[in-house]
Amino acid sequence: MIEARFGHVNLIARDWRALARFYTDLFGCVLVPPERDYAGPDLERGTGVPGAALRGAHLRLPGLGPDGPTPEIYQFSAMPDGLAPAWRSPQQGPMGTGPAMGMGSQAGVSAESATEAHTLS
């Protein structure tokens, strides 16, 4: 078994502030400054969205301390048309968490499968 820890989950919302408010009001999450702004070739490549720009923040989950996992809530500066809900596995390169956790080669994911997006139904 590989050693890994759950570090974060990324959510894309139409209004990141409204979704963050939902989590802070309902579950007692706390915003973790600073707000984040991302754009550039790495983000475009990682999301597959030309001209991608994201803005958002991390939240701290109640009871898990400063090193606990964080939901990250972002919104695209312009929501791409027809962008299907999808998940990215931890091994999926620059936007995933796999290489940072040392999981890349141990997870048995090929370069071809690492670029696939998986649609949720």
Image: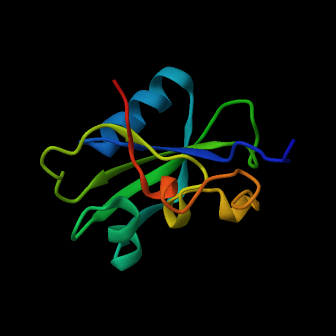
**Residue 58, placed above or below residue 50:** above
Q: Outermost residue, bottom direction? A: 41
110 left or right, relative to 120: right
Residue 37 rendering spot, x and y as whole percentages: 38, 67
Q: Residue at x 62, y 56 (%)?
A: 97
Q: Residue at x 27, y 66 (%)?
A: 52
User: In the image, 98: left or right of 31?
Assistant: right
Where residue 23 sits in the image (x, y, percent)? 47, 30
In this orientation, which residue lies closer to the viewer: 89 or 77? 89
The answer to whether 117 is drawn above or below residue 98 in the figure is above
Q: Position of residue 33 (x, y in %)?
A: 53, 58
- Name the residue nearer the viewer: 42 or 26: 42
Q: How many marks?
A: 0
Residue at image x 37%, y 30%?
120
Q: Quadrant of the C terminus?
A: top left
Looking at the rendered image, the quarter that the N terminus falls into is top right
State which quadrant residue 78 falls in: bottom left
Of residues 9 and 44, the one nearer the viewer is 44
Please indicate whether residue 42 sits to the left or right of residue 4 in the image: left
Colour mode? rainbow
Q: Is residue 100 left or right of residue 27?
A: right
